[in-house]
Image (spheres, rainbow, N blue to C red):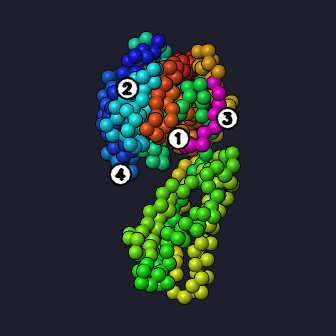
Amino acid sequence: MIDNDRMTDYVMELIKIDSISKREREVALRLKSDMEELGGECLFDDVGKIVNGNTGNLIVNIKGNSRNAPPLLLSAHMDTVGPGEGIKPHIENGIIKSDGTTILGSDDKSGLAVIVEVLRTLKERNIAFGDLEIAFTICEEIGLLGARYLDVSRFRSKHGFVLDSSSPTGLVVKCPSAEDIEFIVHGVEAHAGVCPENGISAIKLASEAIAKMKLGRIDFETTANIGIIKGGIAVNIIPNIVQVKGEARSHDQEKLKEQVTHMRKCFHDAVLKHENISEGKAPQPSLEEFIDRSYDKMDVAPSSKIVKLISQAASNLGHNLELHTSGGGCDANYFNKKGIECVNLGTGMKELHTVNEYLVLEEFNQAAHVVLETIRLNALQ
Ligand SMILES: [Zn+2]
């Protein structure tokens, strides 16, 4: 029933509209006009102001024609990572890809396009469905900020799903908690050639800390990374400041706490070692730390209503839906935390966050069929 060609044309159009995090306005306005054409009631919330972006989340209410069906939340994010400006998508052997100089942005334009195409189909085919509450979010890629600050009291839905993962036959039900971690090491500036003994290198100190740190895959459910280091102004100056940013994630809260404590200890030990070298004589190195819970884990039970509903939809279409655990967070982490039971269904997007990103059209179409069937089944309850 889905018009695959129309949906492909639409996702190509959305991909061509730049929407790097905090600059989603243009794509939001396009969605708003298309939603209004489909009878949607649209509003922008004020989260754009909180995150300093050029638009808020776009919230759309679509009145269903089946009075007794429970309302359902659908969501996809409007922002992309970079390099994502001037994307030139093309179709080749059943996939959409960029010209190789940018990401594709099927993450998450494919999710947006599936939602719009399913709504078009529901209306055209006069299929019975309950009220749909749609959240087109901003700033997912920079810490799920749109969902983090979204006021869910405006929603009546008790369950729903986001379209923001890879496989339309793999439902993500478990995502980890994550901590953002930042260290600022203060050393002592000195001329590197004339009086290096008067200096304490913040870069050397930070590198000693990082060298001792357990990073990468810590165990099957825990990971950690140092992703950004900034510091130093000239080769002949002993650097007095360096900023180090990283993260830790785990499906287990205790393990997450342990990993963060370990990362902090590596920096504390490095600072302490230099204090000892200088025998307590001023000046001393020092450390600032900023630890921020980026998001809490989600863990939706296989017996939950939404998992059963989507599994039944997939099965009606002849697919066997697998339940997946992800190492990444998504907007559903926040929806679950705020009391809306939410899972994450894939749309066929692959090699995300790289210039090799591509969208498999067959899976993209399959995702739309699963979503349509899920909404249809929801109205039969
Ligand atoms: Zn995404």
Q: Which circle's residue, 1 or 3, is located before the other in the chain?
A: 3
Single out the mark in the foreground, 1 or 3. Answer: 1
Pointer 2 residue? 90
Residue placed at 65% from the left, 27% from the top? 322
Please, what is the three-letter code of the amino acid marked with disc 1? Cys
At 43% from the left edge and 16% from the top edge, which residue is drawn? 4
Callout 4–callout 3 Cβ contact below 8 Å: no
Q: Earlier in the sequence, mark 4 or mark 3?
A: 4
From the image, tell me which residue sits under label 3: 301
Q: Residue under circle 4?
A: 52
Vertical arrangement, residue 6 with respect to residue 134, above or below: above
Q: Ligand 1 near label 1 (Cβ, under 8 Å)?
A: yes
Q: Disc 3 versus disc 2: distance between alpha carbons? A: 39 Å
Q: Amino acid at mark 3?
A: Ala
Left or right relative to 347: residue 123: left
**What kind of residue is marked 4?**
Asn
Q: Is residue 20 magenta?
A: no
- Which one is in front, 90 or 140? 90
